[in-house]
Image (cartoon, rainbow, N blue to C red):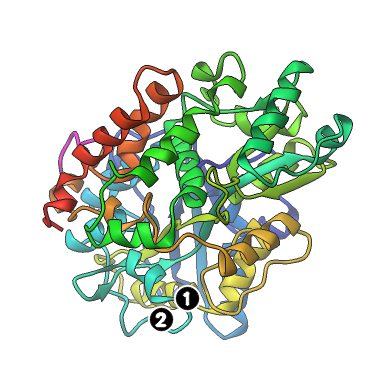
Amino acid sequence: MRIFVKRGSRPRAFRSLKVALLATAVAGPAVLTGCSSSSANGGTPTVTVWSWRSQDQPVWQTVQNDLAKKGVDVTIDFRAINPTSYDAVLRTAMNGGSGPDIFYDRGGEGTQTYGAAGFAKPLDGIIDKSGFTPSTLATAQYKGKTYGVPFAIQTMSVLYNKDLLAKYHLSVPQTWDQWIQEMKTLKSKGVTPLTFMGVQQWMLALQIDAVGASTMSNQFTQDLTDRKASFTDQPYVQTLTAFQQLAPYLEDNWQSTGSQGNEQQTQFALGKSAFDIDGIFDTAAIYQVNPAMKLGQFLVPSPDGGTPKIDWYPDGNISMNAHIKDPAEEKAAEKVVAFSATKPFGDAFSSVAGEISPISGVQIPAKYDVAQQAAQLYRNQAISPLFGIRSPMDTPNPDPSSLTKKNSPASTPGIFDAEQKIAVPLLEGKITPQQAAQQVQDSEKWYFNGSN
Protein backbone atom coordinates (compact mmCIF):
# COMPACT_ATOMS: atom_id res chain seq x y z
CA MET A 1 0.00 0.00 0.00
CA ARG A 2 1.15 3.51 -0.79
CA ILE A 3 0.89 6.50 1.56
CA PHE A 4 1.11 10.16 0.74
CA VAL A 5 1.54 12.47 3.68
CA LYS A 6 1.83 16.22 3.61
CA ARG A 7 5.16 17.26 5.03
CA GLY A 8 5.11 19.94 7.69
CA SER A 9 5.02 20.54 11.39
CA ARG A 10 3.21 17.97 13.50
CA PRO A 11 0.11 19.00 15.43
CA ARG A 12 1.08 20.11 18.91
CA ALA A 13 -0.85 17.27 20.50
CA PHE A 14 1.56 14.77 18.97
CA ARG A 15 4.90 16.40 19.66
CA SER A 16 5.58 14.31 22.75
CA LEU A 17 5.74 11.23 20.54
CA LYS A 18 9.16 10.62 19.04
CA VAL A 19 8.92 10.31 15.26
CA ALA A 20 11.61 9.73 12.67
CA LEU A 21 10.68 9.69 9.00
CA LEU A 22 13.25 7.66 7.12
CA ALA A 23 12.83 8.76 3.52
CA THR A 24 15.13 6.18 1.97
CA ALA A 25 16.62 2.82 2.75
CA VAL A 26 19.69 2.89 4.97
CA ALA A 27 22.85 1.00 4.26
CA GLY A 28 22.88 -1.31 7.25
CA PRO A 29 22.17 -1.87 10.91
CA ALA A 30 24.98 0.42 12.10
CA VAL A 31 23.04 3.41 10.81
CA LEU A 32 20.08 2.32 12.90
CA THR A 33 21.94 2.04 16.19
CA GLY A 34 19.84 3.11 19.11
CA CYS A 35 16.50 1.89 17.79
CA SER A 36 15.90 0.03 21.02
CA SER A 37 16.20 1.90 24.28
CA SER A 38 17.37 0.31 27.51
CA SER A 39 15.50 0.73 30.78
CA ALA A 40 18.31 -0.78 32.84
CA ASN A 41 18.53 2.32 35.02
CA GLY A 42 14.92 2.00 36.09
CA GLY A 43 13.56 4.75 33.86
CA THR A 44 10.51 4.65 31.64
CA PRO A 45 10.98 1.93 29.02
CA THR A 46 10.90 3.04 25.41
CA VAL A 47 9.21 0.75 22.90
CA THR A 48 10.15 1.32 19.26
CA VAL A 49 7.52 0.79 16.56
CA TRP A 50 8.37 0.71 12.86
CA SER A 51 5.86 1.03 10.03
CA TRP A 52 5.53 2.01 6.36
CA ARG A 53 2.44 4.05 7.32
CA SER A 54 3.38 7.54 8.53
CA GLN A 55 -0.31 8.42 8.81
CA ASP A 56 -0.50 6.11 11.84
CA GLN A 57 1.63 8.38 14.04
CA PRO A 58 -1.35 9.76 16.03
CA VAL A 59 -2.67 6.23 16.56
CA TRP A 60 0.42 5.38 18.57
CA GLN A 61 0.15 8.61 20.52
CA THR A 62 -3.32 7.41 21.52
CA VAL A 63 -1.89 4.04 22.54
CA GLN A 64 0.71 5.73 24.74
CA ASN A 65 -1.94 7.96 26.34
CA ASP A 66 -4.42 5.12 26.91
CA LEU A 67 -1.78 2.88 28.44
CA ALA A 68 -0.77 5.73 30.75
CA LYS A 69 -4.37 5.94 31.97
CA LYS A 70 -4.14 2.25 32.81
CA GLY A 71 -0.96 2.85 34.81
CA VAL A 72 1.41 1.53 32.15
CA ASP A 73 4.40 3.85 31.97
CA VAL A 74 5.90 3.57 28.49
CA THR A 75 7.26 5.85 25.79
CA ILE A 76 6.48 4.81 22.23
CA ASP A 77 9.06 5.76 19.61
CA PHE A 78 7.22 5.51 16.28
CA ARG A 79 9.25 5.54 13.05
CA ALA A 80 7.70 5.72 9.60
CA ILE A 81 9.91 4.43 6.79
CA ASN A 82 9.37 5.05 3.08
CA PRO A 83 7.03 2.26 1.87
CA THR A 84 9.24 1.28 -1.06
CA SER A 85 12.27 0.93 1.24
CA TYR A 86 10.55 -0.47 4.30
CA ASP A 87 10.88 -4.20 3.68
CA ALA A 88 14.60 -3.99 2.93
CA VAL A 89 15.32 -1.68 5.89
CA LEU A 90 13.41 -3.89 8.30
CA ARG A 91 15.01 -7.08 7.00
CA THR A 92 18.51 -5.61 7.34
CA ALA A 93 17.89 -4.33 10.84
CA MET A 94 16.27 -7.51 12.13
CA ASN A 95 19.02 -9.65 10.65
CA GLY A 96 21.63 -7.39 12.26
CA GLY A 97 20.05 -7.46 15.71
CA SER A 98 19.09 -3.78 15.70
CA GLY A 99 15.45 -4.09 14.73
CA PRO A 100 12.52 -2.42 16.47
CA ASP A 101 10.59 -3.87 19.39
CA ILE A 102 7.35 -3.85 17.39
CA PHE A 103 7.06 -3.78 13.61
CA TYR A 104 4.44 -3.78 10.90
CA ASP A 105 4.79 -6.61 8.40
CA ARG A 106 2.89 -7.65 5.32
CA GLY A 107 0.06 -10.11 5.90
CA GLY A 108 0.40 -13.75 4.93
CA GLU A 109 3.87 -14.68 3.70
CA GLY A 110 5.45 -11.58 5.25
CA THR A 111 4.40 -12.36 8.82
CA GLN A 112 4.86 -16.08 8.33
CA THR A 113 8.45 -15.61 7.15
CA TYR A 114 9.40 -13.57 10.22
CA GLY A 115 7.72 -16.17 12.41
CA ALA A 116 9.42 -19.10 10.66
CA ALA A 117 12.80 -17.34 10.94
CA GLY A 118 12.37 -16.87 14.69
CA PHE A 119 12.43 -13.08 14.41
CA ALA A 120 8.78 -12.57 15.41
CA LYS A 121 7.58 -13.62 18.84
CA PRO A 122 4.52 -15.88 19.13
CA LEU A 123 1.73 -13.78 20.60
CA ASP A 124 -0.62 -16.53 21.75
CA GLY A 125 -1.26 -15.88 25.44
CA ILE A 126 -0.22 -12.22 25.04
CA ILE A 127 -3.03 -10.91 22.84
CA ASP A 128 -6.78 -11.48 22.86
CA LYS A 129 -7.65 -13.07 19.52
CA SER A 130 -11.42 -13.19 20.05
CA GLY A 131 -12.07 -9.94 18.16
CA PHE A 132 -10.78 -11.27 14.83
CA THR A 133 -12.38 -13.54 12.26
CA PRO A 134 -10.49 -16.79 11.57
CA SER A 135 -9.84 -15.81 7.93
CA THR A 136 -8.28 -12.49 8.94
CA LEU A 137 -6.26 -14.00 11.75
CA ALA A 138 -4.95 -16.70 9.40
CA THR A 139 -2.79 -14.08 7.66
CA ALA A 140 -0.86 -13.70 10.94
CA GLN A 141 -0.45 -17.38 11.76
CA TYR A 142 2.07 -20.06 10.93
CA LYS A 143 2.06 -23.69 12.04
CA GLY A 144 -0.57 -23.08 14.68
CA LYS A 145 1.03 -20.02 16.26
CA THR A 146 0.04 -16.37 15.96
CA TYR A 147 2.84 -13.95 15.06
CA GLY A 148 0.98 -10.70 14.50
CA VAL A 149 -2.11 -8.58 15.11
CA PRO A 150 -4.07 -7.69 11.93
CA PHE A 151 -4.56 -3.93 11.79
CA ALA A 152 -6.57 -3.10 8.66
CA ILE A 153 -8.95 -4.47 6.06
CA GLN A 154 -8.49 -2.75 2.72
CA THR A 155 -11.12 -2.62 -0.01
CA MET A 156 -10.99 -1.77 -3.72
CA SER A 157 -13.81 -0.03 -5.59
CA VAL A 158 -14.44 2.64 -8.21
CA LEU A 159 -14.23 6.17 -6.84
CA TYR A 160 -15.90 8.85 -8.90
CA ASN A 161 -16.07 12.63 -9.10
CA LYS A 162 -19.69 13.61 -8.46
CA ASP A 163 -19.27 17.07 -9.97
CA LEU A 164 -17.84 15.73 -13.24
CA LEU A 165 -20.65 13.21 -13.67
CA ALA A 166 -23.22 15.93 -12.97
CA LYS A 167 -21.55 18.32 -15.41
CA TYR A 168 -21.92 15.85 -18.26
CA HIS A 169 -25.34 14.57 -17.14
CA LEU A 170 -24.07 11.10 -16.28
CA SER A 171 -25.34 8.81 -13.55
CA VAL A 172 -23.63 6.20 -11.43
CA PRO A 173 -23.29 3.25 -13.85
CA GLN A 174 -25.28 0.17 -12.94
CA THR A 175 -23.93 -2.12 -15.68
CA TRP A 176 -20.60 -2.72 -17.38
CA ASP A 177 -21.92 -1.51 -20.74
CA GLN A 178 -23.25 1.69 -19.15
CA TRP A 179 -19.88 2.37 -17.55
CA ILE A 180 -18.06 1.85 -20.86
CA GLN A 181 -20.54 4.14 -22.62
CA GLU A 182 -20.08 6.86 -20.01
CA MET A 183 -16.31 6.67 -20.38
CA LYS A 184 -16.73 7.02 -24.15
CA THR A 185 -18.83 10.13 -23.56
CA LEU A 186 -16.25 11.65 -21.21
CA LYS A 187 -13.44 10.93 -23.64
CA SER A 188 -15.37 12.65 -26.44
CA LYS A 189 -15.62 15.72 -24.19
CA GLY A 190 -11.87 15.84 -23.64
CA VAL A 191 -12.06 14.41 -20.12
CA THR A 192 -9.82 11.52 -19.11
CA PRO A 193 -12.25 8.85 -17.97
CA LEU A 194 -9.86 6.71 -15.91
CA THR A 195 -6.38 7.19 -14.46
CA PHE A 196 -3.95 4.26 -14.12
CA MET A 197 -0.33 4.28 -12.93
CA GLY A 198 1.59 1.97 -15.23
CA VAL A 199 4.76 2.40 -13.19
CA GLN A 200 3.00 1.19 -10.04
CA GLN A 201 2.24 -2.34 -11.10
CA TRP A 202 1.15 -3.35 -7.62
CA MET A 203 -1.81 -0.99 -8.04
CA LEU A 204 -2.62 -2.46 -11.46
CA ALA A 205 -2.78 -5.91 -9.86
CA LEU A 206 -5.19 -4.62 -7.22
CA GLN A 207 -7.30 -3.15 -10.03
CA ILE A 208 -7.42 -6.55 -11.72
CA ASP A 209 -8.65 -7.97 -8.43
CA ALA A 210 -11.32 -5.23 -8.18
CA VAL A 211 -12.64 -6.27 -11.61
CA GLY A 212 -12.38 -9.94 -10.69
CA ALA A 213 -14.42 -9.56 -7.51
CA SER A 214 -17.44 -8.58 -9.62
CA THR A 215 -16.68 -11.00 -12.46
CA MET A 216 -16.07 -14.23 -10.58
CA SER A 217 -18.48 -15.95 -8.22
CA ASN A 218 -17.76 -16.96 -4.66
CA GLN A 219 -18.21 -20.57 -5.76
CA PHE A 220 -15.53 -20.17 -8.43
CA THR A 221 -13.01 -18.60 -6.03
CA GLN A 222 -13.77 -21.42 -3.59
CA ASP A 223 -13.07 -23.91 -6.37
CA LEU A 224 -9.78 -22.11 -7.08
CA THR A 225 -8.84 -22.35 -3.43
CA ASP A 226 -9.80 -26.04 -3.39
CA ARG A 227 -7.77 -26.67 -6.57
CA LYS A 228 -10.93 -27.73 -8.44
CA ALA A 229 -10.64 -24.84 -10.91
CA SER A 230 -7.76 -23.00 -12.52
CA PHE A 231 -6.89 -19.48 -13.62
CA THR A 232 -7.25 -20.53 -17.25
CA ASP A 233 -10.96 -21.19 -16.74
CA GLN A 234 -13.53 -18.84 -18.26
CA PRO A 235 -14.36 -16.71 -15.18
CA TYR A 236 -10.75 -15.56 -14.72
CA VAL A 237 -10.21 -15.12 -18.47
CA GLN A 238 -13.35 -12.97 -18.49
CA THR A 239 -11.86 -10.91 -15.65
CA LEU A 240 -8.75 -10.20 -17.72
CA THR A 241 -10.87 -9.52 -20.81
CA ALA A 242 -12.87 -6.90 -18.92
CA PHE A 243 -9.71 -5.36 -17.48
CA GLN A 244 -8.23 -5.08 -20.98
CA GLN A 245 -11.38 -3.31 -22.18
CA LEU A 246 -10.51 -0.38 -19.92
CA ALA A 247 -7.36 0.46 -21.90
CA PRO A 248 -8.94 2.94 -24.40
CA TYR A 249 -10.14 5.14 -21.55
CA LEU A 250 -6.84 5.69 -19.77
CA GLU A 251 -4.76 8.86 -19.97
CA ASP A 252 -2.41 8.99 -22.95
CA ASN A 253 0.78 8.50 -20.93
CA TRP A 254 -0.51 5.95 -18.43
CA GLN A 255 2.53 3.67 -18.93
CA SER A 256 4.84 6.33 -17.48
CA THR A 257 2.45 7.57 -14.81
CA GLY A 258 3.30 6.74 -11.20
CA SER A 259 6.97 7.67 -10.83
CA GLN A 260 6.00 9.96 -7.95
CA GLY A 261 3.72 7.31 -6.53
CA ASN A 262 0.57 9.39 -6.20
CA GLU A 263 -0.25 10.75 -9.65
CA GLN A 264 -3.39 8.63 -9.89
CA GLN A 265 -4.90 10.13 -6.76
CA THR A 266 -3.67 13.65 -7.53
CA GLN A 267 -5.07 13.76 -11.06
CA PHE A 268 -8.37 12.38 -9.85
CA ALA A 269 -8.57 14.82 -6.93
CA LEU A 270 -7.90 17.76 -9.25
CA GLY A 271 -10.79 16.82 -11.51
CA LYS A 272 -8.62 15.69 -14.41
CA SER A 273 -10.21 12.24 -14.47
CA ALA A 274 -13.70 11.09 -13.61
CA PHE A 275 -13.11 7.57 -12.27
CA ASP A 276 -10.42 5.97 -10.13
CA ILE A 277 -10.25 2.25 -9.31
CA ASP A 278 -8.57 2.59 -5.97
CA GLY A 279 -8.34 1.44 -2.39
CA ILE A 280 -10.11 2.99 0.56
CA PHE A 281 -6.60 3.63 1.89
CA ASP A 282 -6.13 6.41 -0.69
CA THR A 283 -9.22 8.47 0.11
CA ALA A 284 -7.36 10.48 2.75
CA ALA A 285 -4.70 11.39 0.16
CA ILE A 286 -7.42 12.45 -2.29
CA TYR A 287 -9.06 14.73 0.25
CA GLN A 288 -5.66 16.10 1.18
CA VAL A 289 -5.18 17.31 -2.41
CA ASN A 290 -8.76 18.59 -2.68
CA PRO A 291 -10.65 18.83 0.63
CA ALA A 292 -13.75 20.11 -1.16
CA MET A 293 -13.99 17.21 -3.58
CA LYS A 294 -17.37 15.50 -3.81
CA LEU A 295 -16.34 11.88 -3.80
CA GLY A 296 -18.55 8.92 -4.60
CA GLN A 297 -18.02 5.17 -4.76
CA PHE A 298 -19.46 2.20 -6.62
CA LEU A 299 -18.39 -1.37 -7.24
CA VAL A 300 -17.01 -2.41 -10.61
CA PRO A 301 -20.13 -3.47 -12.53
CA SER A 302 -20.26 -7.14 -13.40
CA PRO A 303 -19.45 -7.70 -17.09
CA ASP A 304 -22.00 -10.55 -17.26
CA GLY A 305 -24.76 -8.72 -15.40
CA GLY A 306 -24.25 -10.48 -12.08
CA THR A 307 -24.22 -8.91 -8.64
CA PRO A 308 -21.04 -6.84 -8.17
CA LYS A 309 -18.86 -7.58 -5.16
CA ILE A 310 -16.18 -5.69 -3.33
CA ASP A 311 -12.58 -6.85 -3.34
CA TRP A 312 -10.82 -6.77 0.02
CA TYR A 313 -7.72 -8.03 1.76
CA PRO A 314 -6.06 -7.97 5.19
CA ASP A 315 -3.34 -5.34 4.84
CA GLY A 316 -0.71 -6.37 7.35
CA ASN A 317 0.06 -7.28 10.93
CA ILE A 318 1.68 -5.75 13.97
CA SER A 319 4.39 -8.11 15.22
CA MET A 320 6.83 -8.19 18.13
CA ASN A 321 10.57 -8.75 18.00
CA ALA A 322 11.47 -12.13 19.50
CA HIS A 323 14.93 -10.92 20.59
CA ILE A 324 14.43 -7.92 22.87
CA LYS A 325 17.36 -7.95 25.29
CA ASP A 326 16.00 -5.68 28.02
CA PRO A 327 13.39 -7.55 30.16
CA ALA A 328 11.58 -4.34 31.14
CA GLU A 329 11.44 -3.23 27.53
CA GLU A 330 10.17 -6.65 26.47
CA LYS A 331 7.44 -6.51 29.12
CA ALA A 332 6.41 -3.05 27.98
CA ALA A 333 6.38 -4.18 24.34
CA GLU A 334 4.06 -7.06 25.26
CA LYS A 335 1.61 -4.59 26.83
CA VAL A 336 1.77 -2.35 23.75
CA VAL A 337 1.20 -5.18 21.26
CA ALA A 338 -1.59 -6.57 23.47
CA PHE A 339 -3.31 -3.18 23.33
CA SER A 340 -3.14 -3.26 19.53
CA ALA A 341 -5.57 -6.20 19.58
CA THR A 342 -8.25 -4.30 21.55
CA LYS A 343 -11.27 -2.31 20.42
CA PRO A 344 -9.82 1.02 21.71
CA PHE A 345 -6.89 0.54 19.33
CA GLY A 346 -9.25 -0.26 16.47
CA ASP A 347 -11.31 2.83 17.29
CA ALA A 348 -8.18 5.00 17.23
CA PHE A 349 -7.02 3.45 13.97
CA SER A 350 -10.33 3.95 12.17
CA SER A 351 -10.69 7.46 13.57
CA VAL A 352 -7.26 8.54 12.35
CA ALA A 353 -6.87 6.55 9.13
CA GLY A 354 -10.49 6.34 8.03
CA GLU A 355 -9.94 2.66 7.24
CA ILE A 356 -11.64 -0.56 8.28
CA SER A 357 -10.32 -2.16 11.45
CA PRO A 358 -10.59 -5.96 11.54
CA ILE A 359 -11.39 -5.83 15.26
CA SER A 360 -14.99 -6.69 16.07
CA GLY A 361 -17.23 -3.79 17.07
CA VAL A 362 -15.13 -0.96 15.67
CA GLN A 363 -17.14 1.65 13.78
CA ILE A 364 -15.75 4.13 11.24
CA PRO A 365 -16.54 7.77 12.15
CA ALA A 366 -19.24 9.53 10.12
CA LYS A 367 -16.70 11.98 8.67
CA TYR A 368 -15.35 9.11 6.55
CA ASP A 369 -18.55 8.51 4.60
CA VAL A 370 -16.88 6.65 1.71
CA ALA A 371 -15.06 4.37 4.16
CA GLN A 372 -18.33 3.76 6.02
CA GLN A 373 -19.93 2.65 2.76
CA ALA A 374 -16.94 0.41 2.01
CA ALA A 375 -17.23 -1.18 5.45
CA GLN A 376 -20.90 -1.90 4.81
CA LEU A 377 -20.09 -3.46 1.45
CA TYR A 378 -17.32 -5.52 3.06
CA ARG A 379 -19.77 -6.89 5.61
CA ASN A 380 -22.53 -7.67 3.12
CA GLN A 381 -21.19 -7.89 -0.43
CA ALA A 382 -17.59 -9.13 -0.37
CA ILE A 383 -15.89 -11.65 -2.62
CA SER A 384 -15.19 -14.71 -0.48
CA PRO A 385 -12.87 -16.50 -0.40
CA LEU A 386 -10.16 -14.25 -1.78
CA PHE A 387 -8.49 -15.16 -5.07
CA GLY A 388 -5.74 -12.53 -5.36
CA ILE A 389 -3.55 -10.76 -2.84
CA ARG A 390 -3.49 -12.47 0.60
CA SER A 391 -5.32 -15.51 -0.77
CA PRO A 392 -3.89 -19.03 -0.33
CA MET A 393 -2.71 -18.74 -3.95
CA ASP A 394 -0.64 -15.74 -2.88
CA THR A 395 0.96 -17.37 0.14
CA PRO A 396 3.71 -19.87 -0.69
CA ASN A 397 5.53 -21.56 2.13
CA PRO A 398 7.76 -18.97 3.81
CA ASP A 399 11.48 -18.91 3.13
CA PRO A 400 13.20 -17.85 6.37
CA SER A 401 16.58 -17.72 4.63
CA SER A 402 15.30 -14.82 2.51
CA LEU A 403 15.66 -12.57 5.57
CA THR A 404 19.36 -13.31 5.87
CA LYS A 405 20.30 -13.30 2.18
CA LYS A 406 22.26 -10.26 1.08
CA ASN A 407 20.22 -10.00 -2.10
CA SER A 408 16.80 -11.39 -1.32
CA PRO A 409 14.53 -12.21 -4.26
CA ALA A 410 12.36 -9.24 -5.14
CA SER A 411 9.27 -11.29 -5.87
CA THR A 412 7.43 -14.45 -4.90
CA PRO A 413 5.45 -16.93 -6.99
CA GLY A 414 2.17 -15.65 -5.55
CA ILE A 415 -0.84 -14.61 -7.63
CA PHE A 416 -0.36 -10.92 -6.77
CA ASP A 417 3.14 -10.92 -8.22
CA ALA A 418 1.91 -12.82 -11.30
CA GLU A 419 -0.83 -10.25 -11.93
CA GLN A 420 1.69 -7.42 -11.73
CA LYS A 421 3.68 -9.02 -14.54
CA ILE A 422 0.74 -9.38 -16.95
CA ALA A 423 -1.06 -6.06 -16.28
CA VAL A 424 0.89 -3.71 -18.58
CA PRO A 425 1.25 -6.15 -21.54
CA LEU A 426 -2.46 -6.90 -21.24
CA LEU A 427 -3.47 -3.23 -21.34
CA GLU A 428 -1.07 -2.59 -24.23
CA GLY A 429 -2.63 -5.45 -26.20
CA LYS A 430 0.67 -7.31 -26.41
CA ILE A 431 -0.87 -10.47 -24.94
CA THR A 432 -4.40 -11.83 -25.04
CA PRO A 433 -6.46 -12.50 -21.91
CA GLN A 434 -6.06 -16.22 -22.58
CA GLN A 435 -2.26 -15.89 -22.78
CA ALA A 436 -2.19 -13.77 -19.63
CA ALA A 437 -4.33 -16.31 -17.78
CA GLN A 438 -1.96 -19.08 -18.84
CA GLN A 439 1.01 -17.11 -17.50
CA VAL A 440 -0.75 -16.69 -14.18
CA GLN A 441 -1.63 -20.38 -14.02
CA ASP A 442 1.94 -21.36 -14.83
CA SER A 443 3.24 -19.15 -12.03
CA GLU A 444 0.89 -20.88 -9.58
CA LYS A 445 1.99 -24.45 -10.25
CA TRP A 446 3.43 -24.61 -6.75
CA TYR A 447 -0.10 -24.23 -5.39
CA PHE A 448 -2.06 -26.38 -7.79
CA ASN A 449 0.50 -29.18 -7.48
CA GLY A 450 -0.31 -29.24 -3.78
CA SER A 451 3.08 -28.03 -2.53
CA ASN A 452 1.49 -25.66 -0.03
Residue 169 location (% of width, % of height) = 87, 34
Magenta span: 405-410
Residue located 37% across and 30% down the image: 433
Of residues 59 and 171, which is closer to you in this image? 171
What amino acid is at disc 1? Ala
Q: Is residue 224 above or below residue 134?
A: above
- Whether residue 64 is visible here, answered yes or no, is no
Of pointers 2 and 1, the one earlier in the residue sequence: 2
Residue located 49% across and 35% down the image: 242
Helix, strand or loop under label 1 = loop
Helix, strand or loop under label 2 = loop
Which residue matches tag 1?
341
Q: Is residue 223 above or below residue 79?
A: below
Q: Are marks 2 and 1 in contact (CB under 8 Å)?
A: yes
Residue located 64% across and 66% down the image: 376
Q: Residues within 10 Å of mark 1 (few under 14, many from 20)?
A: many
Residue 95 location (% of width, % of height) = 21, 49
Mark number displayed over residue 246? none
Is 406 magenta? The answer is: yes
Mark number displayed over residue 129? 2
Q: Is residue 245 above or below residue 254?
A: below
